Amino acid sequence: MSKNFRDVLARGERLVSDGATGTNYQARGLERGQAPEQWLVESPAKVTQLHRDFILAGANIILTNTFGGTAMRLADTGISETAAQVNQRAVNLARNAIQGERVWVAGSIGPSGALLEPFGALSREDAIAQFRDQAQALADGGVDLIVIETQFDLGEATAAFEGARAATGLPLVVSFSFDMGTNTMMGLKAAQVAKEMTALGADAVGVNCGRSLDENLINLKEMRAATHLPVWMKPNAGLPRMTDDDVAIYDVTPEIMGEQAERWLETGAQIIGGCCGTTPQHLRAIAQAVERLRVNA
Ligand SMILES: [Zn+2]
């Protein structure tokens, strides 16, 4: 469906992406210190169930559980399968969740977990190779598009894009996390990354994760004004507060998230969903915002 996905984007159709992976797994029993990818092998039924829950809540796009799916990150998980096997398994588990609905499977590629030169020890060539191999495995597994997400460093984002593009002609979305509020950890602003990703040839550019909904709305406005590309908006369900035993509690309700989602659409986001703290109930409220604005349009 990848060609069809580009057509849908070009028509300006609004789409709903899914919600959080990590925080929902934790609520369903993923233990602290366990990588979400471990569930691909140990609890595959739970992986497919969360995908299914998001589809039932209204998602048109589900992201594979491969955020940490580069070979270098998987090496720390203790999973004995190869990185290519793990990524292809994740695509299969996502596909298994679709029961005739119009849903695209997006291969998730997160940061490498290491800093690139000159900030860290990872060379650009090695980074590109890691991302290329992951994108190749996701494409071989049959994803419809690839989402390079939670990016914060321009060097790494461009390496991920270059690696993914070397592996596949599938649509590529590149999304950034503004962890400092309206800057990424490396000080990037939304307008800047939007221009850079447009020049690179991304199919869409986005805002995901980050901090508060208010700050992410500012990031979205800035991004929207800086590019003609479709904009992807998948923010956290607000800022969590930490309990005494270090559990993140998200106070933003599905109702608040649904109201905010209307602002995202009015601001010009074309694909909307949620990141950390976004449960299937939040996602349903986001999907309903798309319906409300369609009715009112
Ligand atoms: Zn997040």
Image (cartoon, rainbow, N blue to C red):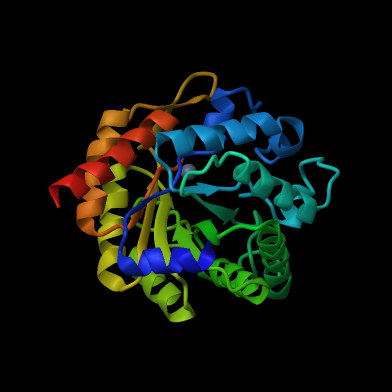
Residue 153 appears anywhere in the view: yes
Q: Is residue 217 left or right of residue 295?
A: right
Please, which residue is most extreme toward the bottom here? 199
Task: Out of 22 and 53, give the one closest to the viewer.
Answer: 53
Looking at the picture, how far across and down is residue 181, in whole percent?
Answer: 35, 50
Residue 236 x, y percent position in the rendering? 40, 41
Q: Residue at x 63, y 29 (%)?
A: 46
Residue extending furthest toward the left: 296
The residue shown at (41%, 68%) is 7
Q: Quadrant of residue 167?
A: bottom right
Q: Is residue 93 above or below residue 206?
A: above
Furthest residue toward right: 80
Picture coordinates of residue 265, whole percent (x, y): 25, 52
Q: Horizontally, is 68 left or right of 276 in the view?
A: right
Q: Is residue 33 visible?
A: no
119 or 6: which is nearer to us?
6
Q: Considering only vertical position in the picture, is 183 above or below 41?
A: below
Residue pictured at 41% horizontal, 34% vertical: 57
Q: Is residue 270 above or below residue 74?
A: below
